[in-house]
Image (cartoon, helix red, strand yellow):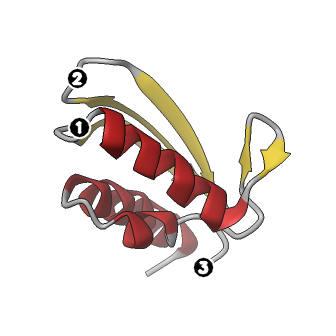
Amino acid sequence: MNITETNRSIAEQFNEAFNRGDLDAAASCFSEACRNHGRKVGRDGVRTVLGEIKTNFPDARLTTLTSVSGGERANSEGRPILRLNWYSQLSLDK
């Protein structure tokens, strides 16, 4: 599997983990050096945000609309079941 396929797979694993409520597994898909709004938050910060989302929207599920990956990045555009549009860019280090 090349780096592009690996990164796309990690992005898919994130959605699957989030959808089944396994927030630790979802957070593990992110680099420890990941940033949120320019601030380094690491996996613990990601886990906190995911927990807040699931607390406030317990039935939230992610569906990928488009996915592009290349090099060390994977970009996904999707839609939660709540019909809120979202966009994420994952910095992957696996």
Number of numbered labels in the structure image:
3
Q: Residues within 10 Å of mark 2 (few under 14, many from 20)?
A: few
Viewer-proximal residue among 85 and 73: 85
The residue where tag 3 is placed is 94
* Of pointers 2 and 1, the one earlier in the residue sequence: 1
Is residue 71 in view from this perspective? no
Mark 2 belongs to which amino acid?
Answer: Leu
Q: Which residue of the protein is positioned furthest toward the right in this rendering? A: 39
SS state under label 2? loop
For the point 24% across and 18% down, which residue is it?
83
In this rendering, position of residue 42 left or right of residue 22: right
* Of pointers 3 and 1, the one earlier in the residue sequence: 1
The residue where tag 2 is placed is 82
Q: Quadrant of residue 11?
A: bottom left
Viewer-proximal residue among 17 and 93: 17
The residue where tag 1 is placed is 60
Mark 1 belongs to which amino acid?
Answer: Ala
For the point 19% across and 60% down, which residue is it?
20
Viewer-proximal residue among 20 and 91: 20
List x then y, in percent, for residue 5. 43, 68
List x then y, in percent, for residue 85. 38, 19
Instruction: Quote the CA–CA distance across marks 2 and 3.
Output: 30 Å
Mark 3 or 1: in front is: 1
> Is there CB contact under 8 Å for labels 2 and 3?
no
